Amino acid sequence: MAGICKIMGIPFNNISMTEALGMVLIALEERRKTVIYTPNPEIVMAAQKDKEFKEVLKSADILIPDGIGIVKASKLYHNPIKERVAGYDLVQALFSRVRTSVNTVYFLGGKEGIAEKAKEKMQRKYRGLNITGTHHGYFKDDSEEEAAIIDEINSLNPEILLVGLGYPRQEKWIAKHKDELNSIIMIAVGGSFDVMSGEIKRAPEFYRNHGLEWLYRLIKQPSRFKRMLVLPVFMIRALGEKFGANIEFKGDRVTIEKVNKKRK
């Protein structure tokens, strides 16, 4: 294994998809509680403005680079990341390996009915995969409904818990409740249930293989344009960090501050 690559203070595991899957399977076998987050450039940028979120990301047991922008930015550092490890692909690979085992899964997140639909499709795709329960993500934090969800998850005792509540809520939710949950593997999966259910079509293989999944999403959803602007800003920030400068964008102003201390 190639250790850690820090980008703007976020310590990514420099691992391949094969290595990431191996780490998850070993944790399952050893019954070792493991939290996995899957940051992309948008998430890394959000963490720069939210200190709590940044600390939550840093607390993960495995932090994989889910975004070609992360891989490209890593090339500015001494320990460039081997490859993009998409959270969706990691989950699919995990399903393929555990479908004939005793390990069970729970889906938490998405709009009402989406997780259930995703469950049906995944169980058809991976014969033998045991998804013991689902619940939508439209519940209030610190509510009686949330407490009931946690009780249900623990009563079903799934080894693998997938949480798709959108960032930063899903990561903060896992960090807050991981010690009271019985699950071994907990993964923040963003909008994966929408894709698993067929509600949203994933980018074709050509776009994924060439690091252009963002372009496909933009073509399909032009309304994402404003969100996509974070990508060039992320690369500029990463470049500035390499040369010891903190670059901030505030409205139509750009500030550059020399940073003398080591990156954290």
Image: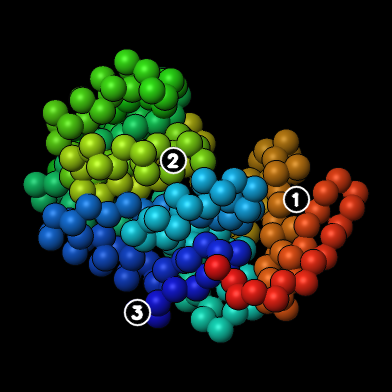
When the figure is inspected, residue 182 is found, relative to residue 207, above or below; the finding is above
Q: First in sequence: mark 1 or mark 2? A: 2
Q: Residue furthest top?
A: 144
The image quarter containing residue 156 is top left
Q: Label for residue 1? A: 3
Report how far apart the C-alphas of labels 2 and 3 lie in the structure.
28 Å
Give the amino acid at mark 2: Lys
Please state which of residues 169 and 23 is positioned toward the viewer in this rendering: 169
Secondary element under disc 1, as helix, strand or loop, is: loop
When the figure is inspected, residue 62 is found, relative to residue 111, above or below; the finding is below
Residue drawn where x is 72% and y is 72% of the image: 259
Q: Position of residue 58 (x, y in %)?
A: 45, 58
When the figure is inspected, residue 264 is found, relative to residue 55, above or below; the finding is below
Give the amino acid at mark 1: Leu
Q: First in sequence: mark 3 or mark 1? A: 3
Nearer to us: label 1 or label 2: 2
Judging by the rendered image, the residue that carries numbered circle 2 is 172
Q: Label for residue 13? A: none
Report how far apart the C-alphas of labels 1 and 2 lie in the structure.
25 Å
Q: Position of residue 181 (x, y in %)?
A: 23, 38
Residue drawn where x is 13% and y is 60% of the image: 30
Secondary element under disc 2, as helix, strand or loop, is: helix
Give the amino acid at mark 3: Met
Q: First in sequence: mark 2 or mark 3? A: 3
Q: Is residue 248 left or right of residue 192?
A: right
Judging by the rendered image, the residue that carries numbered circle 1 is 229
Q: Position of residue 195 (x, y in %)?
A: 45, 39
Report how far apart the C-alphas of labels 3 and 1 lie in the structure.
33 Å
Q: Position of residue 4 (x, y in %)?
A: 44, 73
Mark 3, other Cα within 10 Å: few <14 / some 14–19 / many ≥20: few
